[in-house]
Amino acid sequence: MWPRMNTLQDWLAHCERLHAKNIDLGLDRVKAVAERMALRFGGTVITVAGTNGKGSTCAMLEAILQQAGWRTGVYTSPHLVHFEERCRLQGEIVKADDLVPHFARVEQARGEVSLTYFEFSTLAILSLMAASSLDVAILEVGLGGRLDAVNIIDADCAVITSIALDHMEFLGPDRESIGREKAGVMRAGRPVVVSDPVPPQSVLDHAAQLGADLWRMGRDFNFSGDKQQWNWAGRGRRYSGLAYPALRGANQLVNASGVLAALEALRDRVPVTAQAVRSGLAQVELPGRFQIVPGQPTLVLDVAHNPHSVAALAENLDAMGFYPTTHAVFGAMADKDLGPMLARIGPQVDRWYFTDLPTPRAESAARLLARWQAQETRRDVLATAYQEPLQALQAAIAAADPADRILVFGSFFTVGGVLRDGVPRLHAKHLGP
């Protein structure tokens, strides 16, 4: 019998102690436990894999399907502030107490099987979702696809968003290798939407070998637009004069196009109206994705933490217009390709605030500062190291003028670290009455 665990925090602490590795790819262990739990989904399942854009894709699918009247559940990871953010039922973040019995179910079923924190918690959330009488379950893949715990569930439709270089120690050294891993979420005879405009050949080859129903950007669906509105066309349906998604950033049209393709591919199972599409895209919310917090100075939060997503962030910052000074709070994992990230966004930053993060996987603020110093050529840029994201943000707020811009970006720990401690409160305090 397991030790007495009454709260979600008790169970999460238990999960952290169980397995020697934080990440241990492979489905044998998690599949064995899932089979003992008789884990089954009654409704439609959509799996979302990819390097960037997964969270936005899940949020848009959820918003549109809810507007159409379907009962939705979403699983995403990691979380920004609270673990419970990883699961939403009918648009609401689940309560910690509702998760507890499902952690107990996993513990009871696993016996001597050793599960990682991610595997254990994924099974608990999937158990809660399976028990919630959902019409549609939207499951974000944590890492890769083929060997990720989420892939034990057979999806009725898979979406593969942009594929870029990240987690290379697990997924391979190039886009072709990474694409092959992501392609593992496909199922024979079922639709797979590839919203990356230039997908690796490995993704296309796997779809052909498997006999999946491939929906490819530029062939099976496409979009166009001007500054005011955009249009989408798929195999059997068109939308014209759409308002831009409420999620900011040019890359969101690519994500939204993949979402509409997935919904078109599933129209016989979960039909949605044009009005549901318009309302869902207009109302979708997702913290930490080019999120602009109202007030002065302008505050931008973004979980961009690889070269591809940082390039998109840099383009979005460019489109915001002129700010006298941009202050950047940045913290990241040590295994990230940090040089290209700093180089890409560097020209837009006038003051850096590097921060330590509360995880052993993180690069230290001192080493981030040293890496930046080794490649920075501008003499007028200042940089300092801090022990935590909130301390770095406080320093940025103290130094910034009302007309300036503060950017907080990098790891989920960086953005979550400032959200946890109340960005709006700090911001309002700086604004005065």
Image (cartoon, helix red, strand yellow):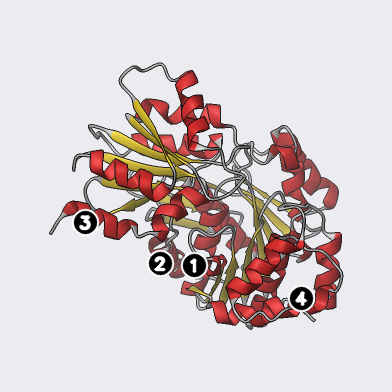
Disc number for residue 279 = 2
Rendered image quadrant of residue 170: top right
Query: What residue is shown with label 4?
Result: 107
Say whether disc 2 or disc 4 marks the residue closer to the N-terminus.
Answer: 4
Q: CA distance from mark 4 to mark 1?
A: 35 Å
Query: Who's the residue at 80% across and 59% down the image?
Result: 189
The reply, left or right, for residue 391 in relation to residue 185 is: left
Q: Secondary structure at mark 3?
A: helix
Work out whether 2 lies above or below 398. below
Q: Secondary structure at mark 1?
A: helix
Quarter placement of the N terminus: bottom right
Say whether disc 4 or disc 1 marks the residue closer to the N-terminus.
Answer: 1
Q: Nearer the viewer, residue 366 or 64?
A: 366
Say whether disc 1 or disc 2 marks the residue closer to the N-terminus.
Answer: 1
Say whether disc 3 or disc 1 marks the residue closer to the N-terminus.
Answer: 1
Say whether disc 3 or disc 4 marks the residue closer to the N-terminus.
Answer: 4
The reply, left or right, for residue 137 in relation to residue 231 is: right
Q: CA distance from mark 3 to mark 4?
A: 45 Å
The reply, left or right, for residue 272 in relation to residue 185 is: left
Tell me the kind of residue under disc 3.
Lys
Residue 373 in percent (x, y) is at 45, 22
Mark 3 vs mark 1: give the one in front. Answer: 3
Residue 332 in percent (x, y) is at 53, 41
Query: Who's the residue at 37% across and 37% down the image?
Result: 328
Q: CA distance from mark 3 to mark 1?
A: 36 Å
Rendered image quadrant of residue 265: bottom right
Disc number for residue 429 = 3
Work out whether 277 lies above or below 390. below
Query: What residue is shown with label 1?
Result: 64
Label 1 close to label 2 by CB (< 8 Å):
yes
Label 3 close to label 1 by CB (< 8 Å):
no
